[in-house]
Image (spheres, grey):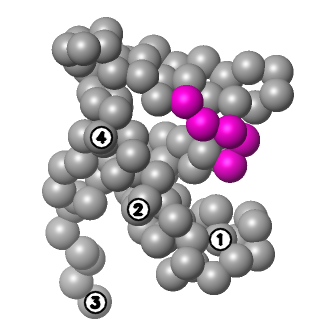
């Protein structure tokens, strides 16, 4: 599954690493704020073209955490962003055949 920003999203990160995501098209206007951990999750998702599994693996390697636990935390965080109206999920590409 892939996570994509909704159309019209603007993103800012302050000097302390706090992320703010605003969705102009969401009514009422979608807004999501988080700290540096969420900022790292956002960056990993964007670097991995919205691929949740790849983002979780990247973060787990960077943080030295279990990939399954990292994915569970990422899922919760994505649900919060979806509830705020700033991201949407879409099916990912089919798995590669061996």
Q: Residue at x 24, y 75 (%)?
A: 95
In the picture, the disc for residue 4 is none
In the rendered image, residue 98, in percent from the top left (x then y), is placed at 28, 89
- Taking 13 as reference, is 9 left or right? left
Q: In the rendered image, which residue does mark 1 sit on?
A: 60
**Residue 65 visible in image:** yes
User: How far is disc 2 from disc 4 in space, using C-alphas?
Assistant: 12 Å
Q: Which residue is mark 4?
A: 83
The outermost residue toward the front is: 28
Closest to the camera, between mark 1 and mark 2, is 2
Q: Which residue is mark 3?
A: 98
Quadrant assignment for the N terminus: bottom left
Q: Nearer the viewer, mark 3 or mark 1?
A: 1
Earlier residue among tags 4 and 3: 4
Which of pointers 4 and 3 indicates the residue nearer the eye? 4
Vertical side of 52 occupied by 41: above or below? above
- Residue that label 2 marks: 75
SS at badge 4 = helix
Q: CA distance from mark 3 to mark 2?
A: 27 Å
First to last magenta residue range: 33-37
Mark 3 vs 1, N-terminal side: 1
Q: Position of residue 40 (x, y in %)?
A: 65, 46
For discs 2 and 4, the disc positioned in front in the rendered view: 4
Chain-order first, disc 1 or disc 4: 1
Q: Position of residue 28 (x, y in %)?
A: 24, 14
Earlier in the chain: of badge 2 and badge 4, it is 2
Asked if 50 appears above or below 84 in the picture, the reply is: below
Residue 78 vertical placement versus 32 (above, below): below
Tag 2's secondary structure? helix
Q: CA distance from mark 4 to mark 3?
A: 37 Å
**Does the CB distance between marks 3 and 1 fall below 8 Å?**
no
Q: Residues within 10 Å of mark 2 (few under 14, many from 20)?
A: some
């Amino acid at each position: 599954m892939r996570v994509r920003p909704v159309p019209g999203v603007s993103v800012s990160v302050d000097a302390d690493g706090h992320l703010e995501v605003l969705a102009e098209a969401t009514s009422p206007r979608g807004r999501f704020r988080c700290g540096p951990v969420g900022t790292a999750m956002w960056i990993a998702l964007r670097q991995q073209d919205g691929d949740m599994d790849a983002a979780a693996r990247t973060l787990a390697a960077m943080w030295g955490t279990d990939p399954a636990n990292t994915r569970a935390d990422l899922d919760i965080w994505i649900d919060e962003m979806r509830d705020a109206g700033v991201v949407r999920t879409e099916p990912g590409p089919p798995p590669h055949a061996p």
